[in-house]
Image: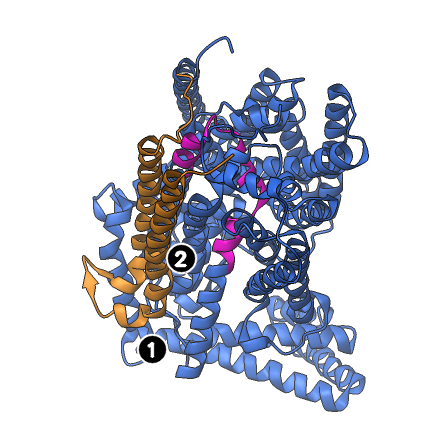
Amino acid sequence: MAQTQSQFATQLKKYYTFYTGGFVTFVILVGILEFAGVPNKILGYLFLAATILLYAGIGFMSKTADVSEYYVAGRRVPALFNGMATGADWMSAASFIGMAGTLYHTGYDGLAFIMGWTGGYCLVALFLAPYLRKFGQFTIPDFLGARYGGNIPRLIGVLAAILCSFTYVIAQIYGVGLITSRFTGLEFTMGVFVGLAGILVCSFLGGMKAVTWTQVAQYIILIVAYMIPVVWLSVKHTGNPIPQIAYGQQLQKVSEREKVLNDKSSPDGAREESVRQIFRDRAAAADANLKGLETGGAAFLAAEKEKLMAKVTELRTTGADAKAIETAEKAVKEYPPTPAAAKKAWTAAKAGSTAKAAPIKPHAEPFPAKDDKARDVAKRNFLALILCLMVGTAALPHILMRFYTTPSVREARVSVFWSLFFIFLLYFTAPALAVLVKYEVYANLVGTSFAQLPGWVANWAAVDKTLMAISDINKDGLVQLAEITIGGDLVVLATPEIAGLPYVISGLVAAGGLAAALSTADGLLLTIANALSHDVYYKIIDPNAPTTRRLVVSKALLLVVAALAAYVTSLKPGDILFLVGAAFSLAASAFFPALVCGVFWKRANKLGAILGMSAGLFFCAYYMYLTYPFFGVNAKLWWDINPIAAGIFGIPAGFIGIIVGTLITPAPSKEVQELVDHVRYPNLEGDINTAGA
Amino acid sequence: MQLTQKHVEYWHKNLVVTGILLFIWFVVTFVASFYARELNSIVILGFPLGFYMGAQGSLVVYVLIIWYYARYMNNLDLEYGVHEGEDD
């Protein structure tokens, strides 16, 4: 090595300080352009092009033909930088854009994600990172293959790694497509493929090495982009620049406001109630339609349509005003054509109106529900979801792989600390952001007149109805809470405008969201391609393959997997949050028991691992198949556990499988037991060597 | 490769510290969430405690757990002579 590790670290700090300075300068320049009158759309393109070019530049400079650099960044990433890279790898579009919105809508119940996605790192630190680093090869299936012997544990590992990473990467590419299309006006499918190009330029030439250094760069962008608007909003509302402390008083105000709005005897509460009554009537109408459809079928549908058409004719003959006629005609035009479509539309209308008619859920109250039994179910699901997310965190291959890249066991331990610290910065802030925006809506937006809506409300309502919809339902000219529909993503996207910041900061937030989605997608695609090229091709099919061919196969697979993932994403399958949850439950059930037992239980052997991993994977996937509506089985829930927390059944199944399989077959060989000692001690005299090239 | 008494002791200490930290992790995660409704009756600086633990308190504890574990184990390596040769 030409330079020592500490010189390398110093040099990196210098580079990234320059880089951060350069990026800030860029943002200021774009800001100046904005004041000079350059249109917002051009500014959006500038941000998109500049950041993707930047990542491409880093990717190009990190090109490599060395196997160790391609798979594990040469194992010389200092703890601090590995922490940043892990942070970017970890925080996806769902964390960056979705998290605060989820908290806005669900209050306390959304905190399962906050705790689950941070607390999991305790398991990584205590059970896995240092031991995997000492083992020190290239992939997670590598460890399973060496520890349990033979190709079967390795292959199950490859299968599970691909299954959960692929599920997760679809959610990421979806996010990339969404952001690209929103900020450039491209069509969603085009956005997906543009984003995909952005992902590939980072990883294609330099594998893990390139991905690591772009992820560090992406982390810096995403954390700056997240913090600026929140701090500004906090200063604007409370005069305190530390939102995590300042939002305590805002939370109190929000809670008081909730009480007022829920209290029908107060003037504000009475206005809310009048809107809710309208929604209750609409829900009842939808329900009556559904009942009519059930008894009358297609005949009922035709009769109802007849009535609507009669109304149009009547309005025309009586000479009603044009607007009323238009509304009536629209109702006819949009009338569901078949009983199936009618059932779907009315069920959705009933559910939507029922939700709108309900009183506000208090933000800070855990498990709000109508009775103790329902509260109990909510609590059970909350705890189960936390467990699945945490154990899943400690089992997702693209995260665990990052701990192969540090120079030593010592650095691996410190690097888990930095990883969680950098992730913590964002997750610690999201609950504050949710409350600050809620305060703005509850205290400032509710009660204003429709003639004087704040700028950000009108802007977003014009851009995207799913993000912001507002209409004067009870026709009193004032905004009521029940008249506002907010999409979760709006919370982060609109914060710069709510805080009164210029458009350049909105562009920065979009660049941050893109960085979050790209960095996660990078890590995931590389994990899938490596599992195939390293574990299947090199370790099983052709162990004598020369280095150049191994890298060619890796890169070819990367392209194939990326194209396949983009294709699946462009079909828009299912809902993002479920895909993400499914990835965690699957990883938790398949990997965690086998990995942990591999280090902490010397007796654990091959049959145990095979049984444990397949049982975990099977139970988890089977429960999702039974209960997730997408698959159409809709069986009864076990103990009322939602499908997103399917890992709660898969994890114990995995442990039981390992224990049973191990105990009915002999203990593993002396070599394997020595391997276990090898990973337990950072340094042993007369130690064996498992480190790859 | 024969493990000495010292090696066994090192591993034992590792298991003890892992167990203790895991217990703390369990308490701030699952016990705090289980009793979140009850904890909410305590209000500090405007934050109901149950809500605060989920939003921030537990997170701070997680960071501290990992920080402490890294420090403790890195010192233990030196004490028991199982540390790696550093190249800097």
- Whether marks 1 and 2 lie on the same chain: yes
Q: Residue furthest top?
A: A2
| Residue that label 2 marks | A451
Q: Pick whichever of labels 1 and 2 is earlier in the sequence.
A: 1
Q: Which three-letter amino acid code belongs to the residue tagged 2? A: Ala
Q: Nearer the viewer, mark 1 or mark 2?
A: 1
Q: Nearer the viewer, residue A336 or A681?
A: A681
Of all chains in the rendering, the one displayed in blue is A
> Which region shows up in magenta?
A388-416
Task: Specify the quadrant of the image occupied by residue A253.
Answer: bottom left
Decide whether the magenta segment is chiefly helix, strand or loop. helix
Q: Residue at x 46, y 47 (%)?
A: A127
Q: Chain of mark 2?
A: A
Q: Nearer the viewer, residue A544 or B67?
A: A544
Q: Which three-letter amino acid code belongs to the residue tagged 1? A: Ala
Q: Residue at x 75, y 38 (%)?
A: A536
